[in-house]
Amino acid sequence: MSEALYIEMPTRKSGKKSLWLRLLPLWALVLLLLGGIWLWLAQGRIVSAHAFLDAMIHVVAPEFSAPVEGFFVREGDSVRRGQPLLRLNARVYHDRLAEAGREGAALRGMAGQASGPPTMEEAAARLKVAQEAEQDMVRRLALARNEEDARLRLQQDSVALHVRLQLDLRSLDAQGGERTAGKSRYAAAVKSEAQARRQMELSRVEYEEASRMRAALEQELGRIRQEMLRYKQMASRQRYAPVPSARLEEARKEQDGTSVDASLYAPVDGRVLRITGAAGQMARSGEALVLLLPEGAAVSENYWLLAYFAQDRAGAILPGQPCRIELEDGQALRGTVQEVLAPQVLPGGKQEKPDGTKVEGKISAALYTPVRISIEPGDKALPLPGTQAKGVVFTRNIWGFYGF
């Protein structure tokens, strides 16, 4: 006779602890470890004592002196790379080039305009004369280019000297001028700045003259090579078709003239920061007419943050470290340390007390380490250069993780 069996499921003994209670020490250890890592990473964040935005302002300037016909943009407009910004009146420059070309043609000594086509022997003789003229013109053009390069270097040196002396004079003015620097020192600075300005203007005029001479010689060399090609064709064909006088005169006029692009274009994508010229103004070679502030894709290459850090912690800052940039309008951008510069005082005579508050004046000679930080552009447009900001450099990481 069968007997019924009753099966009961095993029950957990009340004396054993629950799983979460058994894992509680492990979770506490993990949280303690994460907290220690977070604290260690936070101690590696270095905050700047003073920082501001800086940018490469692109200058749009003509290569030759000419009156300004008009501007196509206004201050604050956004422009694309290659967009025309203004137009010059290049008729005077065009006439000068044409006159130089005519003078060069008169000095060549090659008539080449006798009635009727030249014979094969005459074409060969003219070709030989043209080849000799080409060699002479090549030598003269090389000398002219060397002269132009030398004038350009002198102009650049004079501009750099004038900028340096002008900054020194402005620094003396910011410190109190003649009252604090002394009468003799301030007068010497003013005199040096004025002499440097005159030398800069003189070097600019000399470079412009050398540039015009080089352009005239290049035009003359091109014309000689065109004649050489024409004489080679004449010597090989032995038969010549008569050229109507009207077409010949038109061709001469085209050779005497030079196609000059009188428009100036935007070198990068940006916003028109300032227009320093006006319609009808006589613009000199190299004179700034439009100042462009980079925008869009050009921001990462032409915009940066210049941050000053205390020297006691600046030794941990290295190129390539990530940064967080906090702007006055609330934007938080990412950046990368590009360059660590030599220590110097804060710009504008600003100093910082031990409690972190900033004061004006020369209270100490504390030095700070300036760091150049690249900026990754965000959705909004960046403020103008000179805007105050704050830079935070992350100097510690764990397998590439720097924290948030």
Image (cartoon, rainbow, N blue to C red):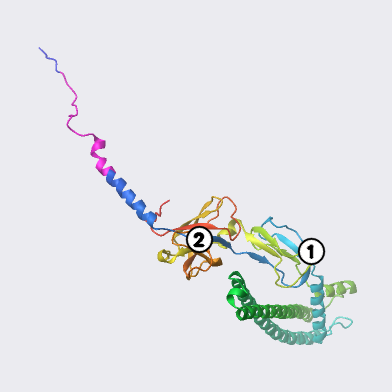
Indicate the position of residue 180 as horizontal and vertical percent values.
58, 74
- Disc 1 marks which residue? 279
Image quadrant holding the N terminus, namely top left
Q: Is residue 366 above or below residue 105?
A: above
Q: Of the residues under marks 2 and 1, which one precedes in the sequence?
A: 1
Q: Position of residue 234 (x, y in %)?
A: 79, 80
Q: Nearer the viewer, residue 28 or 140?
A: 28
Q: Residue 400 in the image: x percent, y percent?
A: 39, 56
Q: Does residue 6 appear anywhere in the picture?
A: yes
Q: Is residue 398 left or right of residue 351?
A: left
Relative height, residue 121 to residue 72 (above, below): below
Q: Residue furthest front?
A: 179
Front disc: 2 or 1: 2
Magenta stretch: dominant secondary structure:
loop
Q: Is residue 124 left or right of 20 when viewed as pictured?
A: right
Residue sitting at x 54%, y 54%: 327
**Stretch in magenta:** 6-27
Say which mark, if any, is on residue 358.
2
Magenta stretch: includes residue 21: yes
Disc 2 crowd rating (10 Å Cα; few below 14, some 14-19, many 20+) is few
Amino acid at circle 1? Ala
- Identify the residue at horizontal 36%, vertical 51% (top origin): 38
**Residue, x 55% and y 58% (percent of image)?**
388
- Name the image quarter holding residue 45: bottom left
